[in-house]
Image (spheres, grey):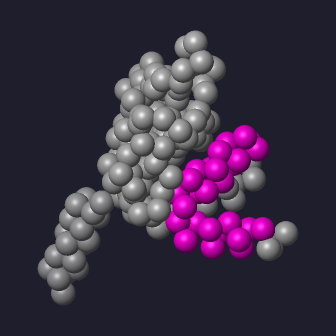
Amino acid sequence: MRGIEVAFLILFVGTLASSEPSAAAVPAADADGWHSWQVDEANASTEMCCFTRQRGDKSRGGCNLDGRNISFSNHGDCSAAPGTLQVYVLMDAGRPKDIRVLSSNCPVSADADITDHGLVSSDDNIAWFRTIIEDRNLGHDVREEALFALVLSESDAAYAYLDRLLTSQ
């Protein structure tokens, strides 16, 4: 009987080690710095980017994620194919400090490396943002940015969640 228990333990540990993390753990609570992932949602708003104005013309200048003065627009030349929304989250001391949602074609820069978590399903994206929205220990601004991110995803599931939030008040 002891051999079977050891075999199951090895199988269990092997399964855990090879399994993909869920988006609820992306980014992990202990992973500080900028993190990014792309949302797999067909209806996502994919035109958000940073722009600069020069002599009345708006041009895509890209986003410095660490910049203080960022101007966002949803009209410009960086829109991506539907379903390619890019999420950026700055984690500090294990907590989200800043959230940006942009077109996947919007060029970005940051003072430090950006950890890319790849493509995330709409359901996993919503699950992660729900943990932020429902954490009353987080600041109002970051919770508001999480709500805005869900709106930009234009997901039916996100809208259903937002509807439940509004009707429960």
Is residue 143 found inside the magenta-colored segment of the image?
Answer: yes
Q: Judge by depth and name the residue closer to the eye, 4 or 109.
A: 109
User: Going by the image, does 169 lie left or right of 3?
Assistant: right
Residue at 21% over, 65% down: 14
Q: Position of residue 36 (x, y in %)?
A: 42, 41
Residue at 39%, 56% in the rendered image: 82
Q: Quadrant of the C terminus?
A: bottom right
Prevalent SS, magenta region: helix
Identity of the residue furthest to the bottom in this view: 1
Q: Which residues are magenta?
A: 139-166
**Rendered view: 9 above or below 64:** below
Most extreme residue toward the front, as rendered? 56
Residue 144 lies, in percent from the top left, at 70, 47
Q: Is residue 43 visible?
A: yes
Residue 32 in sight from this viewpoint: no
Residue 11 on the magenta segment: no
Give the position of the N terminus as an image quadrant.
bottom left
Q: How many callouts does the rendering have?
A: 0
Q: Quadrant of residue 78?
A: top left
User: Which residue is painted at 64% across and 50% down in the image?
Assistant: 148
Residue 30 image offset from top left, x and y in percent: 48, 41
Instruction: Report the residue at 48% width, 57% height from top.
Output: 44
Specify the farthest residue to the top: 55
Image side of residue 68 versus residue 64, left or right: right
The answer to whether 54 appears left or right of 16 in the picture is right
When the figure is inspected, residue 13 is found, relative to residue 84, above or below; the finding is below
Percent position of residue 34, x then y: 46, 33
